[in-house]
Image (cartoon, rainbow, N blue to C red):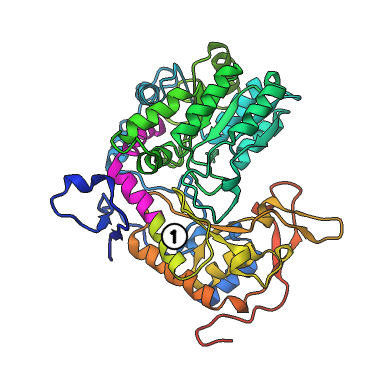
Amino acid sequence: MIQIIEAPQSQVHRRDMAFHARTIIEPFKVRCVEPLPMTSREHREAKLREARHNLFALRAEDVTIDLMTDSGTGAMSQAQWSALMSGDESYAGSRSFFEFESVVRELTGKRHVIPTHQGRAAERILFGAIGRPGLVVPANAHFDTTRANVTASGCEALDLVIAEGNDPRSLHPFKGDVDLARLDALLCERGASVPLVLVTVTNNTGGGQPVSMGNLRAVRELCTRHAVPLFLDCARFAENAYFIKTREPGFSDRSVESIAQEMFRLAHGALMSAKKDGLVNIGGFLALDDDAWARSCRSALILTEGFPTYGGLAGRDLAALAVGLREVLDERYLDYRVASVRYLHDHLARLGVPLLSPPGGHAVYLDGRAFLPHVAPRDLPGQALSIALYREAGIRAVEIGTVMFGRTGEDGRQIPSPMDLVRLALPRRVYTQSHVDYVIEAVGYVFERRAALGGYRIVDEPPTLRHFDCGFEPIADERGMRPGGK
Ligand SMILES: *Cc1c(COP(=O)(O)O)cnc(C)c1O
């Protein structure tokens, strides 16, 4: 097993090494191992039929490399497992809560720290407290659960990302930036109806693309001018801070921690899904300064999550999260994390595979529509590609395209979404370089034989969030992709 990641560019820690290595090694070694399920193509074909070709319906034990999401799928460190053992399970005033609170306060600078069981609970509680019909919540881009919770509170969710953020080929270094002119226009026109401005760091919906400090500072200025609070949806705050350090002029000498602290201090509050940069399998929080909002949020928390010193989590979860929020700021970890994603991206790009570029912090996105140009968007090229990756190599990706965001028209045909992407998300600290090499080889194999792939149709679907549960069938018989097959 090779555990090296090639370093294509100079890295943050190069200067404190006497030996100038070109490889970035995983900054950890493995002590607890989980066997990888290995399956045959016939087995996977049978499982695909059982799952009605919906990869969400597969059992994890039938998946070899699971790149469906980076959410809650990371590996905890020995320090986190130790913290778990010393978690305090007191109902009220748990020691683990205070450890967690002090870490979040130091990071965000916010007085009120409210734990939730995951990100969407923080969203529901915040927007439940401040949202109502007639209001509008602008963001660079709302994540899907965020949009759903904003909308459920009666507000309108508006995405104002810069134009480059919607162009899969643009090499802009901060494709998550907010379009300042459009935000200013909105605040001038409807400022009184904007309860807060939300900035998602990194922009998950747009491919894990970062937001620059310059943009955050400018958004804050607009918010101050219009007296509207600024909140961060900060699931990947550390990856975003790392991109600021490595891509934005003037930040290379700052620590990622101080950059993250500045990001949070520009905002009045933050919502977090800790299942990402919290390095835990479950958890989230809300952090804010406003006393009245905090009071309403705590009341809502007690109703559905739990008492404010545990908020839907066990004491041990809070203890592990307190450790994870510190570990994620380790710059050696972030070097390795971002290099792993870039390694996958660059090797696929070298094979000519159409991709969203540059790579973001947590995933590589294949452009399904360009990958399968002979499959019309209404015939679900992203789904066809995801199915092929599973059938040929046991890799589970996720379609982010017409299945997720399109809909079935009156005539029964699909109304496509703007793009058909296939996301390969890397869980944190889970897979090594040889796993990534396997993925590169598999995508290359499918790419060479792409002409043999056909489209899919949806045969049954639920009324909302259909991608989780709908069934598919191939439009024509798959011609197969066995080695040497036609
Ligand atoms: C994952 C995520 C959420 C939702 O968090 P959950 O923990 O899955 O409920 C919200 N916003 C962003 C940006 C996310 O990535």
In the rendered view, does 14 fall on the left or right side of 55? Answer: left
Q: Nearer the viewer, residue 479 or 368?
A: 368
Q: What residue sits 37% from the left and 55% below the top?
A: 340
Q: SS of the residue at dot 1?
A: helix
> In this picture, is 14 found above or below 307?
below
So how many labels did they put on this image? 1
Q: Is residue 333 magenta?
A: yes
Q: Is residue 389 magenta?
A: no
Where's the N terminus, which quadrant? Answer: bottom left
How packed mark 1 is, by other alpha carbons closer than 10 Å (few <14, some 14-19, many 20 or more), is: many
Q: Position of residue 146 (x, y in %)?
A: 61, 36
Bounds of the magenta segment: 315-341
Q: Position of residue 219 (x, y in %)?
A: 54, 28
Q: Quadrant of ligand 1?
A: top right
Q: What residue sits 50% from the left and 45% below the top?
A: 209
Q: Position of residue 121 (x, y in %)?
A: 57, 32
> In this picture, is 466 found above or below 347?
above
Residue under circle 1? 345
Where's the C terminus, which quadrant? Answer: bottom right
In the rendered view, does 88 fall on the left or right side of 476? Answer: left
